[in-house]
Amino acid sequence: MANTSSRTLRLLSLLQTHRYWPGSELADRLGVSVRTLRRDVDRLRELGYPVEAQRGVDGGYQLAAGAALPPLVVDDEEAVALAVGLQAAAQGGVAGIAESSVRALAKIVQVMPPKLRRRVETLRAVTEPVSFGGGPAVDPAALTVVAQACRDAERLEFGYTAADGARTQRLAEPHRLVALGRRWYLVAYDLHRHDWRSFRLDRLTEPHRTGARFRPRELPAEDAATFVRAGMRNIPAAYTVDVLVHAPADRVRGHIGRWAEITPADGEDGSQRCVMRMTVDSLDWPLFALGGVGADFEVRNPPELAELAREWGERFTRAAG
């Protein structure tokens, strides 16, 4: 059974890294007969992987897109790249991406071997992240520890520096992580103060999980983000960006990737155009991304983005002499 399971994982890994495998070549790579290969493919299908087969002498197999995302098999290099990329996305400027990146990062780090964790930490230590919007830097390792404690309902101990500079040690029951206004907040029940609190993660030091589990308490708010907003002032609101770009949709997607929703909107004269929509808490990032497309664009919303584009344009014009 162990050999069969190991071979099935190997088969899955090969199918995920190659568009199409002739049956005989795939069987040779696995060291099995074509008949055994067919049984292994059927086993993958039973697990929910949509493996397509082409019959005949030159028949083969390939992994197709499914209705849901099945578990992925990644090698060491891919696992390190995923972790580093998620760390960067966790401090990005696009609303919603940061929080989902931290959740995914916590899952990956949980099962990552120590040698790969060291490689990720080494890469992070020698890499200077680019931050749009000027938010304070947060240690990705601390983000991961706090996210895991929230997920597992495990008490957390950490040092904390208040706004007035006072430093204290805290023991808390973590509830949720919230990204607001270019900052990360931990919503938790403070066991020393016997009340709910929100903590800025850039002021939090040396968090570590205590191993003590707890029964989650009921938060006195609709959700964690509402709780944080109720106790904070001057948090930038999220902006809904709507821009008409005079360039093909595929070209804009190539520059901006999946950070925005790109919809074709070709003109009546046959010109290729598209509409870019995204939600951000800093307008610097969408303007920077649009500048990289190399095409004219029209800001539909918000007015603040049009004003920022005007300021940037005047500044660049002066710089050009």
Image (cartoon, rainbow, N blue to C red):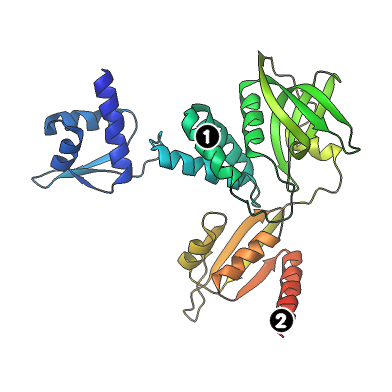
Residue type beneath disc 1: Arg
**Is the residue marked by circle 2 packed among few (<14), some (14-19), or many (20+) residues within 10 Å?**
few
Question: Split into 4 quadrants, where in the image is the N terminus?
Answer: top left
Give the image location of residue 178, x and y in percent: 71, 38
**Is the residue marked by circle 1 packed among few (<14), some (14-19), or many (20+) residues within 10 Å?**
few
Residue at 53% from the left image edge and 39% from the top image edge: 120
Farthest bottom residue in view: 321
Residue at 80% from the left image edge and 23% from the top image edge: 170
Choose between 222 and 236: the one closer to the eye. 236
Residue at 52% from the left image edge and 54% from the top image edge: 258
Q: Earlier in the sequence, mark 2 or mark 1?
A: 1
204 vs 101, left or right, is right
Give the image location of residue 165, x and y in percent: 89, 37
Give the image location of residue 43, x and y in percent: 26, 27
Whether residue 68 is visible, yes or no, is no
Whether residue 174 is visible, yes or no, is yes
Choose between 215 and 134: the one closer to the eye. 134
Q: In front: mark 2 or mark 1?
A: 1
Farthest left residue in view: 57
Q: Which residue does the numbered mark 2 point to in the structure image?
A: 317
Q: Which residue does the numbered mark 1 point to in the structure image?
A: 118
Residue at 48% from the left image edge and 44% from the top image edge: 81
Locate residue 239: give its quadrant. bottom right
Asked if the residues shown at circle 2 and circle 1 are in contact, with their CB atoms under 8 angstroms apart, the answer is: no
Question: From the viewer's perspective, is residue 319 above or below residue 98?
Answer: below
The span from disc 2 to disc 1 (Cα, nearest Å) is: 46 Å
Residue type beneath disc 2: Thr
